[in-house]
Image (tube, helix red, strand yellow):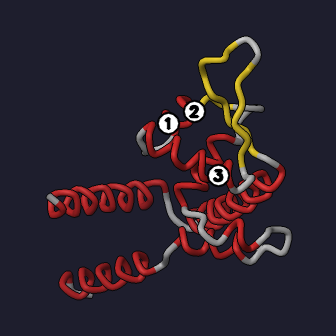
Amino acid sequence: MKKKNSIELIKEQLEAFRSHDVDASILDAIKHNDQLDADVVTSLTISDLHIMRAAARDNGVKISAIVDQVALTQGAVSKIVNKLAAKGLVEKFHQSNNKKDTFVKLTTTGQIINQIHSDYHEREEAQLAKFADDYSKTDLETIATFMAQLNIIREKNEK
C-alpha cells in the first residue's frame, strides 16, 4: 500500500474513532437502567460521573480531595456536588472532629450509577487488553508513539 493511501486510511479510522461518543454511551446505559428514576438521571453529565467516581472512594471524601482527582476547579466541583446532593446521589457531611472540611459520600442510588459507570470502563478495558494481545510490545509502543505525536499536532492546531 502506498504511503499516501495509508495516511488516508489512518485519517478515516481516526474520524471513525472520534465519531464514537463514549461519554454518550455511558450516560445512555445509566439512563436506560430500570433501577433508576429517569428524572434523577436525565441531566447527568460525564463530569457528574467523574465526581461520583472520586466520591466513591472510602466512606466519605473531602471535596478538596475530589478536586485533586478531576480536571475541574474547586468552584465547579462544589457546584456539581450541590447538584448531585439535590438529586439525592451524594450526601454532604462534616465529621464530628472536623467541622471545617465538607465530606461527600455516595447514596445508594449514587452507588448504583457509579457501578454502571465502572462496569462500562471495566468491559472496555478488558476488550482493549484482549485486542492488544494480537500485537507485539514493539507494535503497541509504535502505536502509542504515533498517537502521542498526533495529539501534539492537534494541540498545536488548537492554539
Give the quarter of the figure containing the N terminus.
bottom left
Say which amino acid is labelled 2.
Ile
Q: In which quarter of the image is residue 148?
A: bottom left
Percent across and percent down for residue 104 are 68, 36
Name the foreground residue: 42 vs 58: 42
Q: Is the residue under label 2 in contact with that under label 3 (CB below 8 Å)?
A: no
Relative to 106, is 47 on the left or the right?
Answer: left
Label 3 to label 2: alpha-carbon separation: 13 Å
Q: Mark 3 points at which residue?
A: 84
Q: Quadrant of residue 10?
A: bottom left
Relative to 49, is 159 on the left or the right?
Answer: left
Q: What element carries label 1?
A: helix
Name the foreground residue: 155 vs 128: 155
Label 1 to label 3: alpha-carbon separation: 15 Å
* Callout 1 crowding tier (Cα within 10 Å): few <14, some 14–19, many ≥20: some
Q: How many marks?
A: 3
Q: Mark 2 points at which residue?
A: 63
Q: What element carries label 3?
A: helix
Q: Residue furthest top?
A: 97
Q: Which residue is drawn at 74% across and 62% down?
A: 116
Say which amino acid is labelled 3.
Leu
Q: Is the residue under label 1 in contact with that under label 2 (CB below 8 Å)?
A: yes
User: Looking at the image, is 156 positioned above or below residue 6?
Assistant: above
Q: Mark 1 points at which residue?
A: 67
* Callout 2 crowding tier (Cα within 10 Å): few <14, some 14–19, many ≥20: many
* Callout 3 crowding tier (Cα within 10 Å): few <14, some 14–19, many ≥20: many
